[in-house]
Image (cartoon, rainbow, N blue to C red):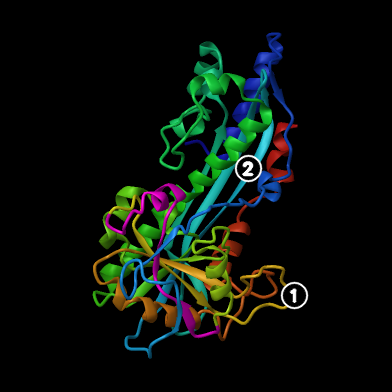
Amino acid sequence: MVADDDLLRTLRALADGRKARGDNTLILRPNPTSQEQFEPQEAFESSIEQGLVLEPYENAPFEIQALVPRQKSVMIKAYCDGIRSTYSLGYEDIYPILYTRNASAVRTRESATGFHTSMYHFQRNQATLLAPFDLFPSSIRGAYERLKLYSHRLADLCWTGSESEEYGPTPSDMLKMGNLAWQSRARRRARHLLDLSEQVTSMAGARLLREQDRTGTNWLLKDGSLFQFKREYLHQPELLRNIVSCVKTHPVPFFSVEGERKTMQLEVGQRSVAFLPRPSREAQQKCTLEQADRPMVSWYLRVRPPNLHSSNHMSGIVRLDIAAFTDWQLWVDELSWAILDEFYGISAMPDPRYDVMPFGIYDCEQFLKAQQLPGELLLAQLR
């Protein structure tokens, strides 16, 4: 895959060359404002409880409980997070062309100094154009391919083979889709590309931790849900044994309004019972943990008192996800204590998400942002 600057310079050269031949169908109008700034928060409505309680037995009532006293020396030894930005570049005839870039990294905290550093340079950077390439005339699409502006199928918004979309548009639907629909599809594809990038880096970091420590007490803390991982990995839980994911927002009420009410009453040092977060389709089918498409174990944990200045009714509460390996019950409380450690002694303030943002994740995010050019400078070469 070509580098960021080469990708944009090549697109600029393609537009200039075609214009010189009298072809004005490739129009470049770069917008330096990242589309993620205006990405609407997803809202979910469901008439059924999507969560399946797993402890003390499957399908038990949803309850909250205190953490049991600490038994093991479980520690968070590494952190993984990623960032992405997506920009509108212009049009090929009537079809939008977008540019997306993402980066993910694994960082670690030095035990002697407390400083955060890169973990053996585990970092991944990716940039690509996004467009409905399959709707371009074959001669135009061929030019993009020869110039390596279209080099893999995930760049084609017409491709529906991605695991992240169970119900993609049909070819006839695509012929009717307008600009806003394609832009929305591009944002979802950009998010999927970031998920894949974080998956690669976090699994590399976790594997190294397992090789360095055979006791299993060193864990990697990843931002976001385990839903981001491919099904094949969630069905091989030993590959994800020492990865715990931290979810900062809670758009899905897995246990309806009453469950949210109980969760809001959590105090620091308390957690919910462990449960399986299910898509609505699996909840309707009453799928068990063994039958789940993406088996995992989740629970809510209060890590800080509520931020009185936050409009988030779940302020100070995170959801933790781990893979459903055979002895997961032994790790829920131990990992909860390790996550609580991440919120005391060091803080992500003044970030407004400090009440649910572990400092190690905040450090990853800031480290990656510091390496990227602002949109204005990045896209200036297209003007």
The residue furthest top is 22
Residue depicted at x 50% and y 32%: 155
What's drawn in magenta, residue-wise? 267-290
Number of marks? 2
113 horizontally vs 261: left or right: left
Q: Which residue is mark 1?
A: 309
Above or below for 224 versus 157: below
Q: What residue do we see at 57% from left, 79% from top?
A: 265
Residue 208: image quadrant is bottom left
Residue found at x 51% / y 73%? 116
Task: Please tell me whether residue 282 belongs to the stretch shown in magenta.
Answer: yes
- Using the image as rendered, state which of residue 260 and residue 215 is in the foreground: 260
Point out the image quarter for the C terminus: top right
| Rendered position, 134 above or below 289 | above
Report the amino acid beneath label 2.
Thr
The residue mark sitting in front, 1 or 2, is: 1
Q: Is residue 56 left or right of residue 223?
A: left
In this view, 141 is above or below 305: above
Point out the residue furthest to the bottom here.
Answer: 69
- Residue position marked by numbered label 2 in the rendering: 86
* Residue sitting nearer the eye, 108 or 62: 62
In the image, is residue 189 above or below residue 78? above
Q: Position of residue 180 (x, y in %)?
A: 68, 32
Instruction: For mark 1, give the secondary structure.
Output: loop
* Secondary structure state at the residue bearing disc 2: strand
